[in-house]
């Protein structure tokens, strides 16, 4: 392995709670039922695809223009919450593991569905850390499509077979598998039948990437 491609939300940091608050505010306003279980289905899924999942519980049909407005409204709430993030939201375990992987000579990249990736990395003090960032701004198909990881591999100039993808979402493990990458899963991602390595915590990467 020559490189490691990290998912952002659920791997490097935890923006789950902010996504939940922002979607819940929108759902309550529209009178749509929304709970933590539905929120779990949004992990790794793009903003518009997430909205479609939420609208499964809606009583009325929304036009594309209304959907765009709703997604923009949710994002405005979410971005306000992201402003509260700081380097304190980067754990010592993640920080020291990333530094050790760099010292061992691995190229390190991000592969996230989020269009807010660069802002989040800036907030937690990793704005200049990664060798490449592939995110929601440079893809047309979201996970489980492998596009976001294939772009990350292309940006760092490595073949998928030489890269490890680190993911917390089953959709991300599927994307890694379909793209020809090895994968390391955290949380529910360990349940995917095609996950290469099952991790208990982020620092397990130091055993996988010797
Ligand atoms: P945005 P990841 C994903 O991040 C989140 O897990 C998912 O819940 C979110 O809908 C998606 O980013 C898009 O985020 O609205 O900021 O563009 O896990 O791929 O890093
Ligand atoms: Mg994730």
Image (cartoon, rainbow, N blue to C red):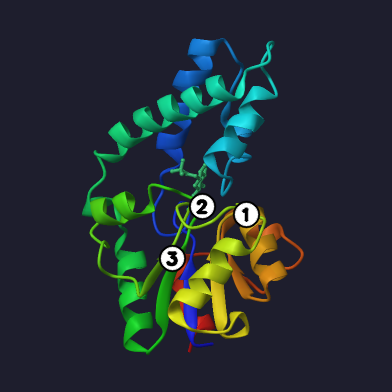
Q: Which callout, 1 or 3, points at the residue further toward the start of the chain?
A: 3
Q: Which callout, 2 or 1, points at the residue further toward the start of the chain?
A: 2
Q: Is residue 15 above or below residue 59?
A: below
Which residue bears the numbered disc 3? 110
Q: Find out if the beta carbon at label 3 lies less than 8 Å from the nearest ligand 1 atom.
A: yes
Q: Quadrant of residue 55?
A: top right
Q: Residue 152: percent from the left, percent from the top?
A: 49, 70
Which residue bears the numbered disc 1? 143
Q: Residue at x 63, y 83 (%)?
A: 161
Q: CA distance from mark 2 to mark 1?
A: 7 Å
Please, what secondary structure does the residue beneath circle 1 have? loop
Give the mark count.
3
Q: Residue at x 53, y 39 (%)?
A: 47
Q: CA distance from mark 1 to mark 3?
A: 14 Å
Residue 60 visible from this viewpoint: yes
Which residue occupies the extreme front position in the image? Answer: 65
Q: Find out if the beta carbon at label 2 lies less than 8 Å from the nearest ligand 1 atom.
A: yes
Residue 195 visible from this viewpoint: no
Check whether the beta carbons of the residues at disc 2 and disc 1 lie within 8 A of each other: yes
Q: Residue 192: percent from the left, percent from the top?
A: 72, 60
Q: Residue at x 51, y 84 (%)?
A: 158
Q: Is residue 109 above or below residue 111?
A: below
Give the numbered dot on residue 113.
2
Q: Residue at x 28, y 70 (%)?
A: 129
Binning the other alpha carbons within 10 Å of mark 2 as few (below 14), some (14 to 19) or many (20 upward) gives: many
Please, what secondary structure does the residue beneath circle 2 have? loop
Q: Find out if the beta carbon at label 1 lies less than 8 Å from the nearest ligand 1 atom.
A: yes
């Amino acid at each position: 392995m020559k490189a490691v491609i990290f998912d952002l939300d659920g791997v490097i940091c935890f923006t789950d709670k902010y996504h939940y608050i922002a979607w819940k505010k929108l759902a309550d306003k529209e009178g749509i039922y929304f709970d933590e279980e539905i929120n779990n289905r949004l992990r790794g899924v793009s903003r518009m695809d997430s909205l479609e999942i939420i609208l499964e519980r809606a009583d009325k049909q929304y036009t594309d223009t209304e959907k765009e407005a709703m997604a923009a409204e949710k994002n405005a709430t979410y971005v306000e919450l992201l402003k509260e993030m700081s380097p304190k939201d980067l754990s010592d375990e993640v920080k020291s593991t990333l530094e050790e992987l760099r010292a061992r000579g691995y190229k390190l990249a991000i592969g996230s569905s989020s269009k807010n990736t660069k802002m989040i990395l800036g907030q937690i003090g990793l704005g200049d850390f990664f060798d490449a960032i592939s995110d929601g701004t440079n893809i047309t198909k979201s996970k489980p499509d492998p596009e976001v990881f294939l772009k990350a591999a292309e940006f760092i100039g490595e073949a998928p077979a030489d890269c490890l993808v680190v993911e917390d979402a089953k959709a991300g493990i599927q994307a890694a598998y379909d793209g020809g990458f090895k994968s390391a899963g955290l949380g529910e991602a360990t349940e995917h039948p095609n996950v290469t390595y099952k991790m208990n915590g982020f620092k397990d990467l130091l055993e996988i990437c010797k």
